[in-house]
Amino acid sequence: MRKLWIISVLIMFLAACGGGQADGPATLEIISLDHAPIRPAVQEALSVAAEYGDKVMVQSYLFGTPEGDAFAEEHGLLEHTPIAIYINGEMEVEVDGRSVKFYSFPQNAGTGMVAEGMWTMDDLRAALDQATN
């Protein structure tokens, strides 16, 4: 009887917490500079997110706008940042056993003047796969 009670409490707890699953769609937030060199990466990231349809809710911000500046301040983005991507509120997520920070240009897309990040669009897709499953 006690075992049944413990299982019932565990089931209620998991139901209240969502069983480890997020309620509703995953979120993808992008903040970027409105500069020609970064626009292709932003557009590609938005295209990757679009592959998930209503499983991913997307919000895009630009630095230098009231909304973008508020988002940047809230997330502590104080330095020159070409692009930062947040998945479910996190810029750094674990993908395939390694930590990936969606910050600055993706690999092989930098300008030489700004260091490129250590992420790829495949990393973004893998992170969104995780967030939507």
Image: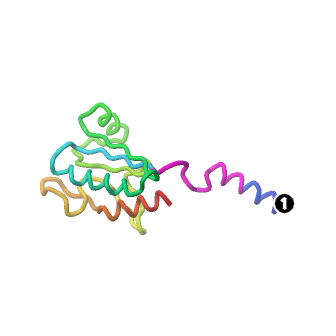
Residue 17 lies within the magenta run: yes
Using residue 38 as the reference point, say whether residue 15 is left or right of it. right
- The rendered magenta stretch, by its main secondary structure, is classed as helix
Does 49 sit above or below residue 97? above
The percent position of residue 42, horizontal first and vertical second, equals 26, 51
* Numbered circles on residues, count: 1
Q: Residue furthest bottom?
A: 96
Residue at figure coordinates x 26%, y 45% from the top left: 32
The percent position of residue 99, horizontal first and vertical second, equals 38, 62
Using residue 123 as the reference point, say whether residue 132 is left or right of it. right
Q: Quadrant of residue 10?
A: bottom right
Mark 1 Cα within 10 Å, few/some/many (few <14, many 20+)?
Answer: few
Using residue 130 as the reference point, say whether residue 114 is left or right of it. left
**SS for tag 1?**
helix
Q: Quadrant of residue 8?
A: bottom right
Residue 54 lies within the magenta run: no
The percent position of residue 119, horizontal first and vertical second, equals 30, 61
Colour option used: rainbow
Q: Residue furthest right?
A: 1
Using residue 124 as the reference point, say whether residue 2 is left or right of it. right
Amino acid residing under circle 1: Arg
Residue at figure coordinates x 71%, y 52% from the top left: 12
Q: Residue furthest top?
A: 66
Out of 110 and 57, give the one closest to the viewer: 57
Out of 3 and 31, give the one closest to the viewer: 31
Out of 67 and 116, give the one closest to the viewer: 67
Out of 58 and 32, give the one closest to the viewer: 58
- Residue position for label 1: 2
The quarter in which the N terminus is drawn is bottom right
Does 48 sit above or below residue 84? below
Q: What is the span of residues highlighted in magenta in the rendered image? A: 11-26
The percent position of residue 51, horizontal first and vertical second, equals 38, 57
